[in-house]
Image: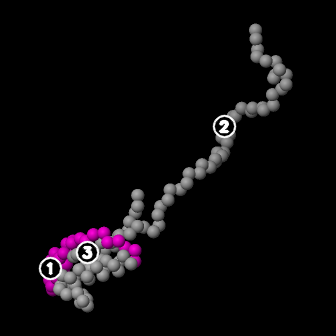
Amino acid sequence: MSNFEYKTICAPRKALKIKGVKGTDNRYAQTLTNVINQQSADGWEYFRAESLPVDEKTGMMAKIAEKYLSLLIFRRERIETYEEPAFSPTKTEEPADPMMQTPVVEDDVSEEAATLGPATR
């Protein structure tokens, strides 16, 4: 699963005067293209455009009016990625419980016991 970070900027409201581009609609399209290209040069990918309502106080009486803002949303993958830590089992020795008695096992087997064989009746 990849994680993204997002950035929003207000879409330009006015078309810039661009040499060689005629007509308001073409100038506005070129203005948007320039904004998107500027953001992509910084590593941001154009994701979508949204028009969202905003309450704005206007006038002397601070009357609230609803206004819509056009936003351009950009995203890019997070630089720091989370990696699962590698599983490395470590044997931790627990302290012995003084109340528990463990039987003492001797590793030495006497020669006599080894040569006798199984018990029979």
- Local packing at callout 1 (Cα closer than 10 Å; few below 14, some 14-19, many 20+) is few
In this view, the mark in front (1 or 2): 1
- Local packing at callout 3 (Cα closer than 10 Å; few below 14, some 14-19, many 20+) is some
| Circle 3 SS class | strand
What residue is shown with label 1?
Answer: 63
In this view, the mark in front (3 or 2): 3
Q: Give percent across and percent down for residue 15.
A: 22, 85
Q: Quadrant of residue 94?
A: top right
Looking at the rendered structure, which numbered label has been put on residue 103?
none
Kind of residue at badge 1? Lys
What residue is shown with label 3?
Answer: 71
Task: State the residue at coordinates (30%, 81%).
Answer: 34
Q: Quadrant of the N terminus?
A: bottom left
| Circle 2 SS class | loop
Along the line of sight, the residue nearer the viewer: 18 or 6: 18
In this view, the mark in front (1 or 3): 3
What residue is shown with label 2?
Answer: 99
Q: Give percent across and percent down for residue 104.
A: 74, 33
Asked if residue 2 can be seen in this view, the reply is yes
Q: Is residue 35 left or right of residue 113?
A: left
Say whether disc 1 or disc 2 marks the residue closer to the N-terminus: 1
Task: State the residue at coordinates (56%, 51%).
Answer: 87
| Mark 1 and mark 3: Cα distance apart in space | 24 Å
Q: Is residue 93 magenta?
A: no
Q: Quadrant of residue 121?
A: top right
Which portion, as a residue range, is magenta? 42-68
Q: Give percent across and percent down for residue 62.
A: 17, 81
**Secondary structure that dominates the magenta span:** strand
